[in-house]
Amino acid sequence: MLEQLKRLQSGIDGLDVLLKGGLVSGASYIVQGRPGSGKTILANQIAFNHVREGGRVLVATLLAESHDRLFQFLSTLSFFEPQRVGAEIQFVSAFDTMQNEGLDEVVRLLRREINRQKATLLIVDGVLNARSRAESQLDTKKFISELQGHAAFAGCTVLLITSARLDDGSPEHTMVDGVIEVGEELHGSRSVRRIQLRKTRGSGALSGLHECEITNDGIVIYPRLESLYSRPSQQDNPDMRRLRSGLGGFDEMIGGGLPESSVTLLMGPSGVGKTCAGLSFLAQCTPEEPGLHFGFYETPQRLRLKAQALGHDLLALEDSGALHILWQPTTAGLLDALGLKLLDAVERLGIKRVLLDSLGGMARVATNQARLIEFFSALMNELRARGVTVMATWEMRDLFGSEINAPAPELSSLVDNLLLMRFVEINSELKRVLSTLKMRDSTYDPFLLEAVIDERGLRLEKTFRNATAVLSGTAIPTADR
């Protein structure tokens, strides 16, 4: 039987997920990144979380900067508890010792303080200065080796903080058990923070780049959704019962309704009625099987007014617990943060229906468009596994025309049902048409339907019996048969 490594939880949810349980107790890690990348906040956040769990921390700095200045900056963050400084967390400056007496004396100083404080976590800030003070790579290796040895003997985990981006073959990298790198990149005018586990000896981890941000609570890390849910967390529900779509006349054409735990993508140009159809879908929610509107372009108040004009009382549904609304602007945000926010709401509120309005709005915050297919695939598979029936919208650019562009390469293959809404001109009158392009789990009537929107909501009628070329945008009337 394999022995499980003892873990020291960082208290940062996303980081513990990346590390598959937390830091390995007694191991040593480098936290590296350019100045301002957040590494000092990360280390101190781990320190204060650790003492709340009963641990003791020694923070040693090899920098000339005073501790008072550090406390001034940390005081703006919610995890900072000044009453713990000098008690469970001890701060020691080793800068003068390093400058005047060398690295060997720094090791002796830290060894004494680890034993005196009974520290279970040691943080050394300013390792770059130690590297500069060393006369050779061998001296650097000796410094880290002796520090690791004394800490491990005392059962103490070590975090070494450096502002240098060390190469994989550097003496520091070869000596430590793990390397955590934080950084910041510009995407257009946006600045995006990222974290990467470049080395995790003896332990699994979620590899690759993951987005993070610094908030009033410290660093928040959002693991990449496709790495976190490379496989759904639960088995799919084998029950294929049908749920009412809310679209008048549609359920009879698809065998009784939308299959439970399916994903329906509704494509169409702006103003064609995609959100109206989605509101009809959500109007079928009950307190026993609640729904969620996860939207980007319309605020909750505007959404309620629109629904009221269609005969849907969203406030009543919200008051009964049958409906929840989460709105997020497209001007800011991180893609994985949105995905995790959606999944958290589904779990917390017991959601069974989701209107995701729209996938395009969600995709706008992505800094790497190439991973959208993997992201949406993981998200939809996880929602299916949790028994959620999803309707998502995607805005097409062209108002008229016969050409139909897929919303994104391979995205249409990820959904179970694909519906298309278009504008069509017939007899100098503008109409809306809905067509079913794909139904994965049922047969369906392929007839083109007119989508009529009025104060009673959205209903579908077989209007185009005597017309051809409807999907071209300009229908041609034919003789009555």
Image (spheres, rainbow, N blue to C red):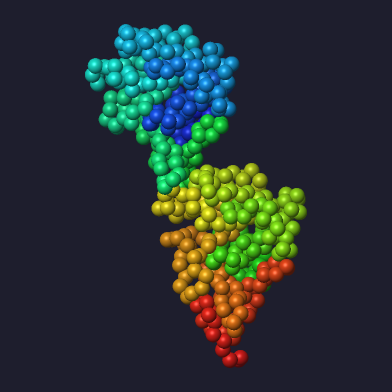
Instruction: Name the residue: 45% across, 41% down.
Output: 192
Instruction: Name the residue: 73% across, 60% down.
Output: 308
Q: Is residue 97 visible?
A: yes
Quadrant holding the N terminus:
top left
Q: Is residue 244 visible?
A: no
Quadrant holding the C terminus:
bottom right
| Residue at the front extreme, as displayed | 189
Residue situated in front as seen by the camera: 108 or 98: 98
Instruction: Name the residue: 32% across, 18% down.
Output: 130
Does residue 311 sit above or below 342 in this rendering? below
Residue 58, given in percent of the width and then of the height, sits at 46, 16
Residue situated in front as seen by the camera: 5 or 218: 218
Instruction: Name the residue: 58% across, 74% down.
Output: 433
- In which image quadrant can residue 254 be found? bottom right
Residue 96, given in percent of the width and then of the height, sits at 37, 10
Residue 56, given in percent of the width and then of the height, sits at 51, 16
Residue 275, given in percent of the width and then of the height, sits at 62, 61
Residue situated in front as seen by the camera: 241 or 301: 301
